[in-house]
Amino acid sequence: MASPTHSSSRSIQRGGRPVRLYRRLRIAAALAVFLSLTAALVDFRELVPVRFGHWLAAIQFVPALVAATAGVMVSAAILGVLVVLTLLFGRVYCSVICPLGVFQDVVSRVARLAGSRKRPLAFAQPHTRLRQTVLWAVVAATLTGWGGLGLALVDPYSNYGRIVSAFFRPLLTWANNAATGLANKIGLLSVYRVDLPLHGLGALVVPSLVLTAVAVLAARKGRLYCNTFCPVGTVLGLLSRKAAFRIAIDKDACTKCGACFRACKAQCIDLRAGAVDFDRCVACFDCVGVCEDHGIGYQFSWIRRPDAATKPRERRQAVASDTGATREPRRTFLGRSFTLVAAGLWAFARGRAAEPTVGPAGPIPPRGATPESDGAAGIRDIDPLRRHAISPPGSIGVRRFLDRCTACHLCVSACPKHVLQPAVFEYGLEGLMKPRMDFTASFCDFDCTKCVDVCPDGALERIPVAQKQAEQLGLAYFDPGKCIVTTKGTDCAACSEHCPTKAVYTVPYGNNLRLPTVDRDMCIGCGACEYACPVQPVKAIEVSGLRTHGLARKDNPRQPKALKPPAEGDFPF
Amino acid sequence: MHTRRDFFRTGLTLGAAACVLPEISKVFAAPASSVPGTTEKPLLSAVRDGTRPAMLDRALADFGGIQAFIKPGQTVLVKPNIGWNTPPERGADTDPDLVGHLVALCVGAGAKKVAVFDRTCDKWTDCYARSGIEAAVKAAGGEVYPGNDEDYYREVALPNGRILKSAKVHRLVLESDVFFNVPVLKNHQGSLMTACMKNLMGVVWDRGFYHRADLHQCIADFLTFKKPDLNILDAYHPMFRNGPRGRSVDDVVEKRMLFASRDIVAIDAAGAKVLEYDPAKVRHVALAGQMKLGVMDLSQVDVRRHAMA
């Protein structure tokens, strides 16, 4: 074994100047991911390819976890890479990949430049109990069937997505629209007005709170949010305790100048004890980048340190009492946590397995109206709140969707028609902020699959366009008593005009008029009819959501496929 | 990708000029009866069995060529139907080759600016792109304008309208020197047919008002405010059912026809006949005829028939 004198790290270089390379690489990589992902989330001009946005989001921890538990092999591999990365180098995810983490660094930097944080952050004790409480709350939520809401509330990536969706995208869209008039006047037609549907106030509560909390904490306390609230930080912290390479202080080289802990945004360098609480370290390398003595840096930690006179367990407890990192034996905590996580995932997978998948003309919830007798009663009998809980294409059913969607709003950004809007209580509490089809805002484009192409966690299954064009999200109900054709005695048919499948068609009515009617077997619930209906204030045709999506028939039973052979001959006049 | 369009642009523009020049000389040589705008019968040029650009050239020749409409330095509005996010073969939007050729003719005639827009039903950027019209217009030297921006619309009064008394109309309609209306002929589930008259709904901001108030009367009323300088109706493969959006290519029937007329009622009456409707049953056409906004009775129209094959 190595001699006791061989105590200085082999991984720390000797030299005159600080090692800035790690930090620079970290900043470059973090900005690349952060700016690209932000661009995808802001993208009101549809300039970012949807698959690019998809992959940037699919490498995030929680989306990868959700998709992996649903059996998506690529996501399982991504999750494996994230775990291995953490086991090798610590919480690189938190500093490079997580957009909420990088956002905090940006806020923190701005606050420091603006002089609002005069004193450097001192070493602080960890909030171990709070961290574990949040993590267990999410596990408990998953066990009790509230995992969909739980993950949505705590996932840092989704929280960042919602902040962009609720505030940054509307702000930038508004700025674009303000600049449009001037740009067009000088002949710049490439700038044009973009519709700006604002989210419902109820959907803004969580993003507002999170933005405030994260911004204030980041400005004043660096990465405190990541080390108290964020359960992804907690999980990765548990892994990074066992990392192969950990940031540590080389006591021989260290001159205790204090530059490292003043640079530390995680408040995890205890200079007095000469220890780094690597659980909370987010691997930003700011400390390494300022140390002129090369007294802090990565050390390979999987072999027993020769200077460790005590046994691992005792040493660990000594470090623990120094840093206060663990108040209970770690093994107990880890054991309990992983049992719970495993149980949660099992329950999660089991709950989903029980869900019926899409089949031919799936079960239709009980309603007053039959397809034959379309009438006012048909709509009135539907719970008015649930009627508008229409889950997006590819979600297959509301239950499955609410279990998997973490409400990152990437699809809300990608939707060119702005028909995807965050729900408030349309799905019930558990659907808070999750996208729904809002046919007062717009309707779903028949040939568009951007939402299913961009979804990172499989909440929207990536179905081909032909399948999307047959997926019944809901069914249209027509109320002839409200229709202009009957009330005013004039032609209209805006509903039928917009219907892409011609489930809504017209039949001769009265004196040379055409009255709409619905063939619900052909209806896909895209909402074009409802959106187009000019009747105010209550539309004469409305789509009611299906809890389990159905499958529409594609052929038209009333029409022959071929119309007539091309006509040869002269003008008919 | 653009070989066909390029071919039309280069080859057919020259070819058209070759066709048109003798026609123009005929026009000038002929007595005043063939000069439009007099009290004579309105002229309807009906062409069949050619490519759309070639049929357009033939039809324009009846009116004295594009130069009869555009003086150098003028601004031109070309208003196709770009209402739907569908490819050209579906026949839900005006054909891009036809629109592109018309724009090229306008540019060739010395137009200062050739603008194209529609207030679409599907998302306008999708419609402009998928219909092929944006690319065709840009390749021909024209510009596409947004139709979704309310800032472009100006309130105008229609004192002679029966129901439509005021409307917000796109600035390009109000400001352009020359106005070409270039719709595609289609069945319509509500108004029975959409052709030249109904295409003008796409220059008005609030279409909901039309639908609520009385669709056909509002369509006719708009003509009391403005009539296009020339209507060109794309009836190459009209949509016979499931209009105006259609479900598939099965809804169109190849007729290989194109009409042009200054009389918007006459040209729509011709369109109705192609779709096998009685023009009098298409109520907005009948109303416009009653309001003397045009001639619905084709026996009172000077129809020039041309078969190109």
Image: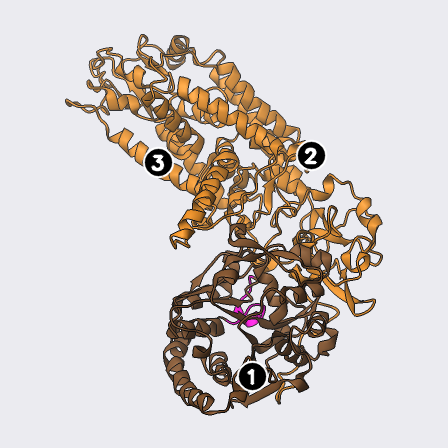
| Subunit of label 1 | B
Which badge, 3 or 2, is on the more N-terminal residue?
3
Name the image quarter holding the N terminus of chain B.
bottom left
**Mark 2 belongs to chain:** A
- Displayed quadrant of residue B295: bottom right
The amino acid type, in three-letter code, at marker 2 is Gly
CA–CA distance between discs 1 and 2? Answer: 62 Å
Q: Is residue B201 magenta?
A: no
The image quadrant that residue A343 belongs to is: top right
Colour given to chain A in the rendered image: orange
Q: Where residue A417 appears, x then y in whole percent?
A: 56, 50
Between marks 3 and 1, how big is the CA–CA gap? Answer: 63 Å
Residue found at x 24% / y 31%? A21
Based on the picture, tell me whether residue B90 belongs to the magenta stretch: yes
Bin the neighbour count of mark 3 within 10 Å (Cα to Cα): few under 14, some 14-19, many 20 and up: some
Magenta segment range? B85-95
Q: Kindly indicate whether the residues beneath marks 3 and 2 are on one polypeptide chain.
A: yes
The residue indicated by pointer 2 is A428
The residue singled out by tag 3 in the image is A31
